[in-house]
């Protein structure tokens, strides 16, 4: 049976959809997208190019193609294993300190009521806004200095010999400096997350006879699972490129005891003038950072899915 469409129905038919490529918004956004791609691709392309040639500033005429030779030299260098191990130890230690003390301090501030709590919160967060170079200089000259530092004065007061921390415990000193700077970030994220904790659940738990430790273990920690995952992901990405603290205090020494991958790349490029090997090291560091980011994003995505 044939049906006759009413003229009014034909008039109300949806017009054909226009291609998104011809939409005005695409023309407005395309210049910024192209500029962003150029800004990212050109340095990456130059780094890849330099990593495949013999490019040493001391021998400007020798730019032969060497393939993966720079990568092989960088990986087999004696400083690579030390730099990779120090990088892992630095990142892991700072993450552990930030998460553990960040959770404890945030929970303590949330559970206590005292005069000036707002000022204490501001003071706890303030080190995060200090530049890394300034932070390193403060620790180097005011705390760790073996003659005029505060720790040296404390050691002398108790009759002990002052310790030259940056010379005898360089990596531990770097960990303390970086942890002091990144712990406020963890406190800020976790303290903000504590504000959204359901107080009715805590009151119900108290009425059921639960103590502070039980409430912290069964209510507070599960509630902080997501912000802890976010803190770990963001801090890991930034901690892999720690440089200013090492450059300002220990210069990677003594030997390679406080050298990480970022500082090792700097020494190859600006101290040994080997741009080719430094470019290869930079690409290796980029690959390691991307692997860490992908793993952390998958872990956090799984965490967020499981908690929903």
Image (tube, helix red, strand yellow):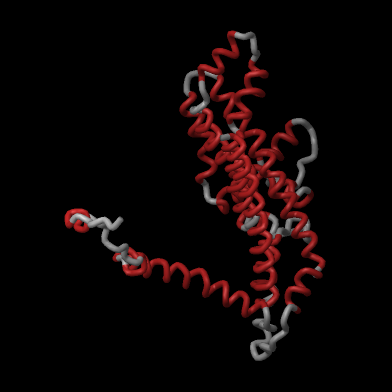
The percent coordinates of residue 63 (x first, y second) are: 66, 88
Residue 142 appearing in the image: no
Give the x, y percent position of residue 171: 74, 50
Furthest residue in direction front, as rendered:
1
The C terminus, quarter of image = top right
Q: Quarter holding the N terminus?
A: bottom left
> At 63% across and 28% down in the image, what residue appears?
221
Residue 150 visible to the viewer: yes
User: Could you tell me which residue is drawn at 57 percent across and 53 percent down?
Assistant: 133
Q: Position of residue 269 (x, y in %)?
A: 65, 72
| In front of the other: 98 or 35 | 35
Does 162 sit above or below residue 206?
below
x, y percentage for residue 33? 42, 67
> Could you tell me which residue is drawn at 62 percent across and 37 percent down?
306
Measuring 59% from the left and 11% from the top, which residue is drawn there? Answer: 206
70 horizontally vs 37: left or right:
right
């Amino acid at each position: 049976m044939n049906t006759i469409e009413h003229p009014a129905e034909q008039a109300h038919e949806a017009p054909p959809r226009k291609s998104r490529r011809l939409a005005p918004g695409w023309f407005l956004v395309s210049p910024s997208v192209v500029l962003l791609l150029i800004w990212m691709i050109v340095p990456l392309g130059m780094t890849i190019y330099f990593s495949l040639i013999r490019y040493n500033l001391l021998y400007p005429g020798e730019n032969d193609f060497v393939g993966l030779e720079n990568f092989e030299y960088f990986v087999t260098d004696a400083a690579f294993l030390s730099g990779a191990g120090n990088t892992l130890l630095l990142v892991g230690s700072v993450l552990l300190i930030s998460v553990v003390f960040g959770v404890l301090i945030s929970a303590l501030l949330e559970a206590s009521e005292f005069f000036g709590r707002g000022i204490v919160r501001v003071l706890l967060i303030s080190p995060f806004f200090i530049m890394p170079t300034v932070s390193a200089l403060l620790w180097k000259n005011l705390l760790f200095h073996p003659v005029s530092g505060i720790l040296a004065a404390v050691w002398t007061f108790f009759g002990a010999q002052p310790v030259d921390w940056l010379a005898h415990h360089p990596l531990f000193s770097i960990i303390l400096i970086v942890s002091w700077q990144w712990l406020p970030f963890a406190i800020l994220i976790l303290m903000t997350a504590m504000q959204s904790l359901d107080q009715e659940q805590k009151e119900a738990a108290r009425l059921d006879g639960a103590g502070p430790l039980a409430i912290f273990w069964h209510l507070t920690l599960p509630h902080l699972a997501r912000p802890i995952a976010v803190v770990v992901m963001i801090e890991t990405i930034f901690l892999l490129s720690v440089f200013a603290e090492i450059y300002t205090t220990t210069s990677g020494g003594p030997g390679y005891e406080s050298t990480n991958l970022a500082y090792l790349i700097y020494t190859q490029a600006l101290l040994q003038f080997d741009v080719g090997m430094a470019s290869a090291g930079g690409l290796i560091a980029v690959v390691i950072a991307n692997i860490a980011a992908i793993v952390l994003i998958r872990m956090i995505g799984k965490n967020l899915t499981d908690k929903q």
